[in-house]
Amino acid sequence: MLTLKEIYELDPNQRYIDEGAGWGAEQMLKAGIPIFYRDEQYPETLKGEFFVKEHPNGERFIVRKYLAENFELLEEAVRPINSL
């Protein structure tokens, strides 16, 4: 697996994409909207249906997001990371 430094050396534009995504996430949290992301600290979130969900108050959970048979996007809290 490549490090961020190696990824940025291979594709310098990736740094700008990542910085823009970080800014967007900050703005969503400031607006009171939870964000979802993957985090190397929680390997189960690196692929598939599992994500970190962060609320504007800083509370974070591992959640599972999946499509139901009727194509409705469902979310299931798996476990808290740092419940407040």
Image (cartoon, grey):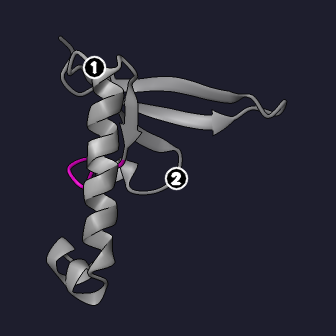
Badge 2 marks a residue whose secondary structure is loop
Per the image, the residue denoted by label 2 is 48
Quadrant holding the C terminus = top left
Earlier residue among tags 1 and 2: 2
Per the image, the residue denoted by label 1 is 56
Q: Tell me the kind of residue under disc 2.
A: Gly
Q: Are marks 1 and 2 in contact (CB under 8 Å)?
A: no
The residue range painted magenta reads 38-42
**Picture residue at 15% right of the left edge, 77% below the top:** 5
List the single residue furthest toward the right: 70
Badge 1 marks a residue whose secondary structure is loop
Q: Is residue 68 left or right of residue 41?
A: right
Q: Is residue 13 left or right of residue 48?
A: left
List the single residue furthest toward the top: 84
Q: How many marks?
A: 2
**Does the magenta stretch mainly form a helix, a strand or a loop?**
loop
Residue 39 in magenta stretch: yes
Give the camera-side residue of 21 and 62. Answer: 21
Position of 47 relative to 13 (above/below): above
Q: Tell me the kind of residue under disc 1.
A: Pro
Residue 45 in magenta stretch: no
The answer to whether residue 61 of the structure is visible from this angle is no
**Picture residue at 46% right of the left edge, 57% below the top:** 47
Q: Quadrant of residue 81?
A: top left
CA distance separating discs 1 and 2: 24 Å
Residue 23 in picture, x, y percent from top left: 27, 44
Give the camera-side residue of 57 and 41. Answer: 57
